[in-house]
Amino acid sequence: MHRLGISLFLAVATTCRPSVSLEDGWNELSCPLIQEARLELLCGGVYTADLFLKYKDALTTVDAPYKVFYHLQNGFYFLLVSFNESPVQSCESTIQLNDGLDFFCGDGESPLRLPDSQVFCHRNIMSYVDDLIYECTKPRITHFLGAEWEGAAAVHYAAKSKKLKLGSAAGMPGLEALLPCLACVLLQK
């Protein structure tokens, strides 16, 4: 009963909240602020329901894996967040993007295969990235970038997993899946 209540709350709450606008960044075949920098793995985690409720990022799903890579040069942060199952999630050292936005793990010479991926370049989503870093670091790192930051972030979305057919685009049970459960609970009373 408690899980049903939480699921129903999440479904209703997410339909009423605007999503984070990644379109404020640009999605094209160049991301000059990140390209050619060797980014080191900072942490990896899973996209939590709390993060979904706060940002409502429709390009990933609750419980989807993500990794954060970073490079610091002259006080300027270069960050890459990669969401969803892909070869990037297996990269445990460094990652680099070339001019064509091909991803290379470690010292590999062959680009990772990332069909249907999207990359958004941003300057103004550091609170989102900060929250992701906070969630995936142990012990927790608060305000990785500090109060006065300069930097840029690229957000990579691998294609969503095909196994999430039931429910909404957010990877959470859709209302169509919850309504029969709600009806059963109400009929039992």
Image (cartoon, helix red, strand yellow):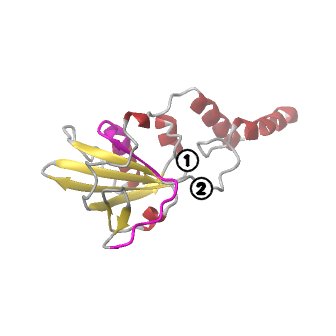
Among numbered discs 1 and 2, the one appearing first in the sequence: 1
Residue marked by disc 1: 61
Q: Which residues are magenta?
A: 108-129
- Dot 1 falls on a residue whose secondary structure is loop
Label 2 neighbour load within 10 Å: few <14, some 14-19, many 20+: some
Residue marked by disc 2: 161
Percent across and percent down for residue 149 are 20, 41
Percent across and percent down for residue 179 are 77, 35
- Residue 162 sits in which quadrant? bottom right
Q: Are marks 1 and 2 in contact (CB under 8 Å)?
A: yes
Amino acid tagged 1: Thr
- Identify the residue at image location x=47%, y=65%: 113
State how far apart marks 1 and 2 are (Cα).
Answer: 9 Å
Foreground of the two, 140 or 144 = 144
* In this view, the mark in front (1 or 2): 2
Percent across and percent down for residue 27 are 40, 43
Foreground of the two, 25 or 80 = 25
